[in-house]
């Protein structure tokens, strides 16, 4: 109920922001409107909100990745299944983001709008770094400096090594581990607090955008939204269906029918974690997957596997680069793929975290975080769609693991073929 009301508030703020912006657009050159409303009032609300988000990015990435990587302990225990699951989760996320970058470059969601009119920033993207430098740049020589500078890839690498060491030491560092878990909960609470400010932030961001650009802001916003949804659907049709048919030997339509319940829960809650009980029940009862597999793959997936989120980040990166007129190089694309794939490990399965992690992807390729303005305004809605993809990826992985482990799942594809033969 509470979550829903925040969504409603954000939606109202979005509408009000559009209306106020459009109303002020004809007077945008007026001294009072410009100085006091656009540059002070809207700017304070919008930029204040983005600064509050930036405040929690580094602690969030560090804590959640450390706790996520510390879970490797279970993976070690589960051996083969663990490795297969991890490879599947990271592999599909990398495919998802690559697809998003490809389709995003094709759709050009941000072409034709110049947000540099809204925010003045010095952007220094463009120089092509050799791939070896991208890789070497991921290894922090001073983790404290990486944290202070907000170098996300370096923070990611440090957090993962930190978490793995914690997992290897097991009970010897149980106090530190518990402390990290508590710290992680604390940071997630901070995310919740900051998200309460979202209606004000969205009002300011959207108000300023529409007051400066007028109706022209509408089209890129729609293009971005539709672009994300298209890639989400393509990812299902291309990646998931292929895996379902070829590896899990399962009829994709039957899958959709059986899995529609959890999908609806994900859509309405925008939370992989909140959907976990329903997908667990569905996979066990309707698909006949054993508890020993599903109770490992699904909870792990709901914390580390976020294909939908990665897709949003890919399309948003292209979108933001285009509205700032920045050309992304191949090296930038690779950086985005690595950052977003690793970031998905640290994205908690709760509403709105994906867009906070987007800040980190942008930072890594040197795009202005202020570019999140438009994306932020409609993120609550994008979140509903991408969460469905997030949990669908977990379910498909579970089916594949069950199949390759020789579990007897209701094998629809084979049944159809047999019937035809008879
Ligand atoms: N809401 C998403 C999830 O729970 C995470 C995100 O992208 O914000 O899966």
Image (cartoon, grey):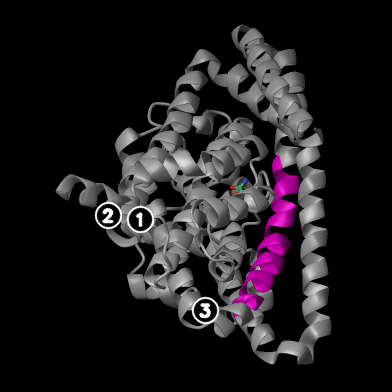
Q: Closer to us: mark 3 or mark 2?
A: 2
Name the element at disc 2: helix
Q: Earlier in the sequence, mark 3 or mark 1?
A: 3
Quadrant for the N terminus in the image: top right
**Percent position of residue 406, x then y:** 39, 72
Q: Residue at x 45, y 39 (%)?
A: 257
Q: CA distance from mark 3 to mark 1?
A: 45 Å
For residue 200, say whether it is visible. no
Tell me if residue 354 can be seen.
yes
The crowding category of the residue bearing disc 3, from other C-alpha atoms within 10 Å (few below 14, some 14 to 19, many at least 20), is some
The residue pinned by badge 2 equals: 414
Q: In the displayed structure, does residue 363 sit left or right of residue 337? A: right
Nearest to the eye among marks 3 and 1: give it: 1
Q: Nearer the viewer, residue 409 or 341?
A: 409
Residue situated in front as seen by the camera: 366 or 170: 170
Asked whether residue 69 is drawn in magenta, I would say: yes
Question: Does the magenta run of residues contain 119?
Answer: no
Question: Could you give the CA–CA distance between mark 3 and mark 2, rounded to whole angstroms?
Answer: 48 Å
Residue 35 lies left or right of residue 77; in this view the side is: right
Q: CA distance from mark 2 to mark 1?
A: 6 Å
Q: Is residue 274 positioned above or below 120 on the image?
A: below
Is label 1 in a helix, a strand or a loop?
loop
What residue is disc 1 on?
411
Q: Which mark is residue 364?
A: none
Q: Which residue is under mark 3?
A: 139
Q: Residue 337: horizontal and vertical position, in percent?
A: 42, 59
Q: Position of residue 342 (x, y in %)?
A: 52, 65
* N-terminal-most mark, 3 or 2: 3
Q: Which residues are magenta?
A: 50-72
Question: Residue 391 versus residue 199: which sits nearer the camera?
Answer: 391
Q: Are marks 2 and 1 in contact (CB under 8 Å)?
A: yes
């Amino acid at each position: 109920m509470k979550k829903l009301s925040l969504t409603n508030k954000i939606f109202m703020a979005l509408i009000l922001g559009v209306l106020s912006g459009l109303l002020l657009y004809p007077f945008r050159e007026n001294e009072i409107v410009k100085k006091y409303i656009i540059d002070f009032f809207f700017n304070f609300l919008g930029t204040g909100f983005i600064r509050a988000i930036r405040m929690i990015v580094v602690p969030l990435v560090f804590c959640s990745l450390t706790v996520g990587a510390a879970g490797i302990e279970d993976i070690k225990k589960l051996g083969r299944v663990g490795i297969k699951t991890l490879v599947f989760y990271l592999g599909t996320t990398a495919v998802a983001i690559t697809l998003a970058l490809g389709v995003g470059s094709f759709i050009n969601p941000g072409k034709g709008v110049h947000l540099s009119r809204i925010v003045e920033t010095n952007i220094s993207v463009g120089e092509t770094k050799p791939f070896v430098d991208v890789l070497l740049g991921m290894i922090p020589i001073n983790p404290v400096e990486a944290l202070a500078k907000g170098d996300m890839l370096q923070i990611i690498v440090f957090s993962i090594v930190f978490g793995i060491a914690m997992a290897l030491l097991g009970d010897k560092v149980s106090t530190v581990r518990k402390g990290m878990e508590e710290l992680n909960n604390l940071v997630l609470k901070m995310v919740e607090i900051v998200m309460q400010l979202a209606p004000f932030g969205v009002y300011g961001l959207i108000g300023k955008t529409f007051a400066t650009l007028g109706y022209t802001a509408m089209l890129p916003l729609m293009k971005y939204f539709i672009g994300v949804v298209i890639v989400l659907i393509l990812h299902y049709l291309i990646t998931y269906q292929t895996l379902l048919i070829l590896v899990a030997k399962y009829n994709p339509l039957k899958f959709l029918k059986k899995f529609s319940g959890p999908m609806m829960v994900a859509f309405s809650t925008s939370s992989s974690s909140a959907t976990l009980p329903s997908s667990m029940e569905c996979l066990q009862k309707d698909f006949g997957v054993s508890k020993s597999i599903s109770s490992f793959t699904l909870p792990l997936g709901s914390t580390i596997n976020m294909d939908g989120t990665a897709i949003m980040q890919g399309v948003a990166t292209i979108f933001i680069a285009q509205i700032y007129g920045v050309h992304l190089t191949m090296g930038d694309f690779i950086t985005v793929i690595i950052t977003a794939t690793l970031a998905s490990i640290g994205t908690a399965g709760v509403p709105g975290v994906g867009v906070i992690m987007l800040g980190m992807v942008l930072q890594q390729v040197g795009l202005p975080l202020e570019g999140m303005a438009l994306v932020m305004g409609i993120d609550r809605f994008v979140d509903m769609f991408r969460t469905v993809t997030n949990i669908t990826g977990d379910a498909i992985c579970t089916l594949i693991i069950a199949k390759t482990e020789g579990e007897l799942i209701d094998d629809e594809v084979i049944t159809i073929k047999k019937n035809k033969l008879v």
